Structure formats: structure tokens, C-alpha cells
């Protein structure tokens, strides 16, 4: 076997061992939620909830372009305030002008995740 062939074989073997080891120790783990910080996980959950419960009124990105004419949430001017407690109250209790209450639909954890995502939209 020539030196080049031997070198190529050793390199190929080394790469194969590296890949196999990565799979065994979790280096190629496809469950990305393990890599997210708690804040990132909360925002991901809130984004999913927003897509399911809010986008039809407020638009997919909170731009106010939903089919039911909900106000934009991607700015700083919220009718009832853009502080955390005001947003949480709006989601939990609803508002007279058409915002439904989600207290019977969402858990407290889900309400908090959705609140964090709505606050994130302000940035």
C-alpha cells in the first residue's frame, strides 16, 4: 500500500470514528430543545401558542394584519399598556373591545409563555 493510500485510509478511519463517537455521546443530537436556554424555550412555546391562538387576529408576526383586524403588537403603543402585567391581564382576562379571555383555554405556564412572546414582539 502506498503512503498516500495509507494516509487516506487513516484519515477516513479517523473521520468515521469521530462521527460514530459523536452519535454515541450525543454530539449529533437532533432534539434541539436541549440546547436552548430556558428563556429561548419559553419564547419558542409562546411563538407556537401565538401562531395557534393569536395570529388570526394580530397577524403572523404581530403586525396587526390578521383577518379579524386585531391591533399590531410589534410596536410599543398598546392600548392597555405594554408592561408585563398589562399584557398578561389582556391575555388572561380579555378586553371589552374584542380581545377574548384565554383563562379557560391556557394554563398559567402557557399564558406566561405567550406574554413573554408578545413582549418580545415589541423589540
Image (tube, rainbow, N blue to C red):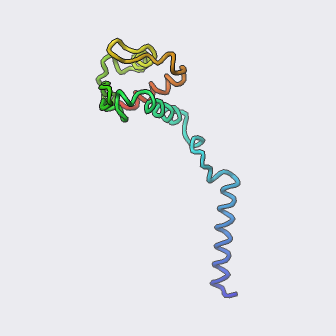
- Image position, residue 109 (x, y; %): 54, 23
**Relative horizontal placement of residue 96, taking residue 116 as reference (left or right):** left
Give the residue furthest to the front: 67
Above or below 34: residue 119: above
Above or below 47: residue 104: above
Quadrant of the drawing holding the C terminus: top left
- Image position, residue 73 (x, y; %): 34, 27
Give the residue furthest to the bottom: 2
- Image position, residue 83 (x, y; %): 38, 20
Quadrant of the drawing holding the N terminus: bottom right
Above or below 96: residue 3: below
Q: Residue at x 36, y 35 (%)?
A: 61
Quarter location, residue 9: bottom right
Q: How many marks?
A: 0
Can residue 123 be seen in this snapshot? no
**Relative horizontal placement of residue 40, taking residue 120 as reference (left or right):** right
Comparing 35 with 102, the one in front is 102
Q: Residue at x 49, y 16 (%)?
A: 103
Quarter location, residue 62: top left
Comparing 69 with 35, the one in front is 69
Q: Residue at x 67, y 69 (%)?
A: 14
Above or below 110: residue 8: below
Q: Residue at x 45, y 31 (%)?
A: 52
**Relative horizontal placement of residue 15, taking residue 57 as reference (left or right):** right
Quarter location, residue 76: top left
**Relative horizontal placement of residue 38, taking residue 1 as reference (left or right):** left
Amino acid at each position: 500500500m502506498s503512503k498516500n493510500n495509507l494516509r487516506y485510509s487513516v484519515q477516513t478511519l479517523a473521520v468515521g470514528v469521530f462521527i460514530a463517537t459523536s452519535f454515541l455521546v450525543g454530539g449529533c443530537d437532533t432534539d434541539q430543545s436541549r440546547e436552548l436556554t430556558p428563556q429561548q424555550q419559553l419564547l419558542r412555546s409562546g411563538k407556537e401558542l401565538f401562531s395557534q391562538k393569536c395570529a388570526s387576529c394580530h397577524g403572523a408576526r404581530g403586525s396587526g394584519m390578521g383577518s379579524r383586524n386585531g391591533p399590531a403588537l410589534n410596536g410599543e403603543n398598546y392600548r392597555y399598556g405594554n408592561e408585563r402585567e398589562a399584557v398578561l391581564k389582556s391575555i388572561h382576562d380579555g378586553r371589552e373591545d374584542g380581545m377574548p379571555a384565554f383563562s379557560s383555554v391556557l394554563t398559567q405556564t402557557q399564558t406566561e409563555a405567550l406574554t413573554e412572546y408578545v413582549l418580545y414582539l415589541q423589540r
